[in-house]
Image (cartoon, grey):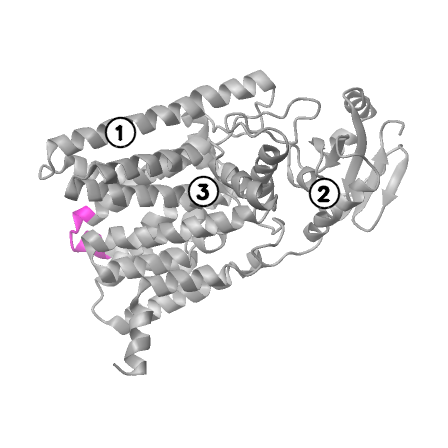
Amino acid sequence: MNVKSGAAQYFKDIRFWIILFFIVRLYGITFPPLEVGHNWRQTDGLMIARNFYERDSNIFYPTVDLGGEKTGIVGCEFPLLNYLVYLVSLAFGYEHWYGRIIVLIFSSIGVFFFHRLIRKFFGEPAAFNASILLMVSFWFSYSRKNIPDVFAISLCITGLYFAFEYFEKGKWKHLLLYFILGLLGCLAKISAATVLTILLLPVLDKANPLFRKAWLVSFSIVILAAIYGWYFVWVPYLNETYGLAGHFFMGTTFHEGWQQVVAHGSVILKRFYDTPMKYTGFAVFAAGLFLVIRKKHWIVLAAFLLPFISYLLIIIKTGSSIIGDTYYVITVVPCMAFMAGYGLSLIENKKIVTAALIIVSIEGIAARMYDFRLRQPYKALADLEGIMDGVSKRNDLIAVNGPFDNPTGMYFAHRRGWSLTNEFLADPNNLNDIKSKGCKYIVIVRKLYGDMDLALPKVHESEYFKIYAVADR
């Protein structure tokens, strides 16, 4: 075999591309979570991980630093990712970037099993195309963020593969792997459960033994019961008991959500044709959908529609939140990549297929390169803890200006307290209220959240921060 043909074999092997994309995304892996895209979502999870390490390691009582004078115990997604960060910290000491590398590892495994699952039923070309499209999609940047979405979906995709292995081979180890991975994935992010809806196809297939169907359905019911128990019993209990009901968004009613979707229809629609795979990727997806319907490949269409329609129900439940919280889109990316990849496999001219993959990859990666660098004034927040250590004690309660309940400033201050808007802080009555609750300092993040002057003693002033003493030192 000559060198040229040997290289071609590598390029055709999805493992080569998974490793390559893994290495590429290692760039800046140790950066603090201050990229523009949802730094608040990352710091919120890292708060919980750090508090497992520094305060209480009980996984059933996740804690944030935004409770003010309260305990900070909060209902949220099952903190599996946060707990993995904590476990790694036990061995090496706490570092924020552990979350990034954990998500990157699991997302790479998820792509591997995504490929194997598609190859099992639809062939290597469809599997290869879909896997490449997935890696250059929105997945590219969010598969290295400390956010549970890609992590949870990867667990569910891997669990889905073993569920199909169980149907084919009837081995209990495959059923157990499906159960564990599916359970953990769904608990880590409830929307990841949409991935598992594809199992309706083998359950309805008369060729599969009834005995295997019964066991898989039984284990799936346990997963659903666990989801219900955590999200609809335990989370409300924590929020009501410890007073942080507004911190974790549990969605709205379907009626209100539908009204919001209708009112913002054009913007929400953009989340489908722009955000997941950018414009060229959506064009390939639309072409694939057209070819599948035209050629009457109904199983392929069903495999796409089951998670896609389930995802639409999630969108209605969350309402207009998808406009700002674009990470909600991650849930639907795998099934869109599958449809696009399968559509490309129907094209006989391989040069056209290769060109399409290259064009979509260039646009997808180029559109997300901004996520691999830190810019001011966000970057300045990395210095806030050191500044605060010079003026206050670690156990002092503080307030940081910014969007209400935004965790980023508080996380980097490495203290507990409140995140409060400038309008709130401008009211002397509000200042007296937080003072009575134990607040000792107010941090104004000048260039990021807006500058303001307070009639209080100033203990620090720099280009990016002002710090005021609320109580006598």
Residue 253 vs 49, above or below: the answer is above
> Where is residue 9, by image quadrant?
bottom left
Please give the residue where the numbered disc 2 appears in the rendered image. 449
Spatial separation of the CA atoms under disc 2 and disc 3: 27 Å
| Quadrant showing the C terminus | top right
Residue 267 in view: yes
User: Which x, y percent locates residue 369?
Assistant: 54, 61
Query: Local crowd at mark 3 within 10 Å, few (<14), some, or many (≥20)?
Result: many
Residue type, numbered disc 2: Tyr
Pick out the residue farthest to the bottom: 2
Residue type, numbered disc 1: Phe
Mark identifier at residue 149: 3
Spatial separation of the CA atoms under disc 1 and disc 2: 48 Å
Range of the magenta residues? Answer: 291-299
Mark identifier at residue 219: 1
Q: Secondary structure at mark 1?
A: helix
